[in-house]
Image (spheres, coloured by chain):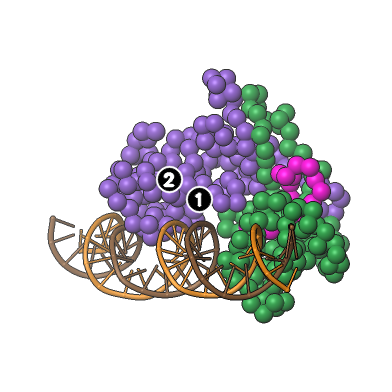
Chain colours: A green, B purple, C orange, D brown
DNA sequence: CTATTTTTGCAACATGGTTGCAAAAATCAC
DNA sequence: GTGATTTTTGCAACCATGTTGCAAAAATAG
């Protein structure tokens, strides 16, 4: 959770982004592996840190970070989108696992969706898979 | 496309729903296999048929049809939800294939997401898979 | 430090989700 | 069928969120 400021600064700069207070806090917030938040959750968390956050500023920063692929947008269900720090996976559209117990969102690049799973003649361009369930950690400690 | 009115009426009644003009047109619209529309697309299509459609009425009818499982809601990406006539598959959360060429949305119940695809300790409760690509038909005729 | 570029905060507007309520339509009981 | 009852519709209204423009503030470059 406590990522060094220099680490975050370096990440932002490496993507050609200026470093501002909101961006630093925003990235810091998503730095924990597995943590993925909705815009509302981000807004609330940032308000605790910064007092108040303009929703337009947050909205624009989310867009910039998405464009530069610092973060990813993952549609959990028809009415929820979560934001997550982009991992190191090459493909943008790898599967995710959402734990209904602890709300963690984990990348599952080991799960592959391949063309041979489909009837003949179908070509895959991309795919998006969300698996909802209980993660290994919650499964044990529960 | 031209499903007999009696067929649609029967479908609605079988779910315990009264038959109204909007519901009939709405179901008729989604009757074509593979057709899936956004709320906006539905609204526009219905306006051609009925002159004008109140967005609240449409919204409420979509909700009722979802509840009764006459239709399903499928999140195509972070900013698009499509509605589709519910098929005959037992599981609600079967995979879908979205053709980027003809925009058809096809059910792919043959693609299975199984627990053994995940690391040990993970339990699957449900899953949601959207595969984007080119369908067999477009692939040939293209 | 000053000039230039970027970012922020705010007003404003659009769109979609949601509720309440009275009028209209559908269904039910005769 | 008629009238009573239940359901559905259409509309006003409100809230949350997406989106743009613009001037002030902050960050960066020289």
Q: Give the image quarter of residue B112.
A: top right
Coordinates of residue D26 in the picture (x, y in percent)? 69, 72
Q: Tell me, for residue B69, which label it has, or none.
A: 1
Q: Quadrant of the C terminus of chain B?
A: top right
Q: Which residue is mark 2?
A: B41
Residue ID at (70%, 51%) = A68
Q: Can you say whether A116 is above or below B21 in the image? A: above
The chain letter under disc 2 is B
Residue A88 included in the magenta stretch of the image: yes
Q: CA distance from mark 1 to mark 2?
A: 20 Å
**N-term-proximal mark, 1 vs 2:** 2
- For the point 71% across and 30% down, the residue is A115
Q: Is residue B40 magenta?
A: no
Depth check, front residue: A96 or A27: A27
Residue plotted at (72% across, 77% down): A49
Q: Which residues are magenta?
A: A81-96
């Amino acid at each position: 959770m406590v990522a060094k400021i220099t680490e975050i600064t370096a990440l932002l700069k490496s993507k050609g982004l200026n470093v501002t207070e909101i961006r630093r806090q925003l990235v810091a917030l998503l730095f924990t592996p597995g943590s993925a938040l909705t815009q509302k959750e981000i807004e609330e968390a940032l308000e605790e840190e910064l007092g108040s956050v303009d929703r337009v500023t947050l909205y624009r920063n989310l867009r910039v970070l998405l464009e530069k692929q610092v973060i990813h947008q993952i549609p959990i269900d028809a009415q929820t989108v979560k934001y997550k720090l982009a991992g190191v996976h090459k493909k943008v559209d790898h599967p995710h696992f959402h734990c209904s117990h602890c709300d963690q969102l984990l990348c599952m690049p080991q799960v592959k969706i391949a063309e041979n799973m489909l009837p003949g003649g179908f070509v895959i361009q991309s795919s998006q898979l969300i698996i909802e369930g209980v993660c290994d950690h919650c499964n044990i400690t529960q």
